[in-house]
Image (tube, helix red, strand yellow):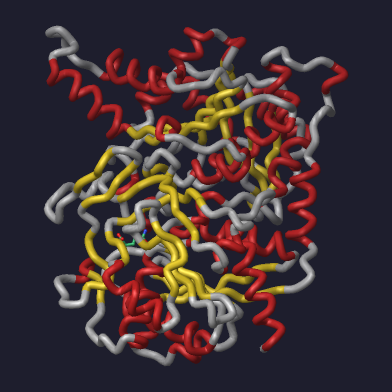
Amino acid sequence: MTRFIFITGGVVSSLGKGLSSAALGALLQARGYRVRLRKLDPYLNVDPGTMSPYQHGEVYVTDDGAETDLDLGHYERYTGVPARRSDNVTTGRIYSNVIAKERRGDYLGGTVQVIPHVTDAIKEFVVSDLDDEDFVLCEIGGTVGDIEGLPFLEAIRQLGNELGRERTLFVHLTLVPYIPSAGELKTKPTQHSAKELLNIGIQADMLLCRCDREIPADARRKIGLFCNVREKRVIQALDVDTIYQVPIAYHEQGFDTEVLGHFGLLEEEDKDSLDLSRWRDVVHRVREPEGEVTIAIVGKYTNLLDAYKSLAEALNHGGIANNVRVKLNWIESEIFEREDANYYLEDCDGILVPGGFGSRGAEGKIMAARFAREHKVPYFGICFGMQMAVIEATRSLLDIADASSSEFGPCEHSVVGLLTEWSRGNTVERRSASGDLGGTMRLGAYPCVLTPGSRVAEIYGDRLEIGERHRHRYEVNSAYKEQLEQRGLKFSGMSPDGILPEIVEIPDHPWFVGVQFHPELKSKPFDPHPLFRSFIEAAVNQSRLV
Ligand code: GLN
């Protein structure tokens, strides 16, 4: 029997609903249950694929090629369960499906309304494409009281009724702020938020209260009394020094125990039958590293950390694997177009150019790749970062000064060009320059064949076929492959049909690797991605040289 846990948020946004959901998923998993995590997003974009990272942070890509909310990254990193297209839906997607059905005449002349048609579509989404998991944790984006969120809240209210209390649980995440002038923690915002939820017909079963200090027992009692929640189910979510501590901290506060209690799954002897050792090990490594390396990330959205969420996480995982702290030095690439790159890069132990779009800042990224190649500093180019490294090598090693990408406009030597046709399994996908922008990139997991004896083959443990996730419209042009290989830039990973370059590397360099895919999406704290593990290892070696 699958049980559904709905997680809503109140008071303010950014309380970490995604992480809280992921942490609860990890705890239930540690108790031996099978979990799946989902996110309902109340905005009108069909998916976040066309949104600027400034609006929405990173776009997380699933194996099956969906462009989804970054919270799915937290879910996957914490539980190891690969996210799927069916784990994220937006108002835009729900409405476009409902309207398509209306156009087809599926509603047989009926008036199409938010209730029941939109809410039915939401409910259908929540309960479909499951594999008989024990728990589905379903996070509702936004905060209670937002107009956009109402159809989602109404849908989960109905589900609570239809599935019954024994199969559903409502968790509400709120803030209990400390007011310095009063010297007190305030419970009123939580009371109001729980009431707002009740107005919609949802009685929270459990409150997760974010706070920067212990909530005294009497304050917890008061919250429980006013919000009609058992005192033991008012759980404090104290700030922690590392996000990997969250599952442990929640367990110590009895979160998972109370969740199981609600579902009648808690036998007395079961109380402590969970193993959190892998989380304790990760926390230990984060808190007590044996050294430190500095990685320069030369990108475009460097003042918004959410834009590179999985990347920052994967670099930390690389640090965990090598027992070092990874200091991230975010550098806006445009700066190199005005100022000397050496000044910014000479003290770092590794340079990473992440994924990106558009010409702004591209020349700066090319300069960062040049600096890394010439000064023999470890270089990791991801997607756009690989493309810029290949442009750099073509300009410097092949003396083709106008080598560029057709993403920046027409050019004679498009070393990186628009991908108009590629195969996925047995089907051929076709695109044109004038097609839609949404959902039309090369998306999701594709296989890649590695060259035996190459650095990447060694990094991947001598596996010669790997699968990694993609999200790009342009592709390195293999017409320059032979010439570049002669000058030392090897194409050590190709699509199985041998057409699309997937990985380039310079063997005669401490560590210079460019990948067309996004390895950061698959890294986990307790299973760091081999490329990040190896890149940070190279940075550790580099730091010993300086
Ligand atoms: N803009 C490049 C492309 O579309 C790279 C995309 C990326 O880095 N994710 O191919």
Camera-nearest residue between 203 and 303: 303
Which residue: 34% across, 15% down? 120
> Residue at position x 29%, y 74% from top?
480
Residue 264 location, x and y as percent?
Answer: 72, 12
Is 332 placed left or right of 168 in the picture? Answer: left
Foreground residue, 373 or 322? Answer: 373
Q: Residue at x 23, y 16 (%)?
A: 113
Q: Is residue 303 visible?
A: no
The quadrant of the picture occupied by the N terminus is top right
Spot occupied by residue 301 in the image (x, y as percentages of width and height): 40, 66
* Depicted 502 relative to depicted 101: above or below: below
**Residue 426 picture quarter:** top left
Identify the image quadrant of residue 94: top left
Is residue 394 shown left or right of residue 157?
A: left
Q: Is 97 located above or below residue 332 in the figure?
A: above
Q: Residue 462 sits in which quadrant?
A: bottom right
Task: List x then y, in percent, for residue 497.
Answer: 35, 52
In the shown orientation, is residue 268 left or right of residue 450?
right
Whether residue 237 appears in this view of the structure is yes
Residue beneath the point at 16% across and 77% down: 412
Taking depth in this image into account, of 448 and 178 the one nearest to the observer is 448
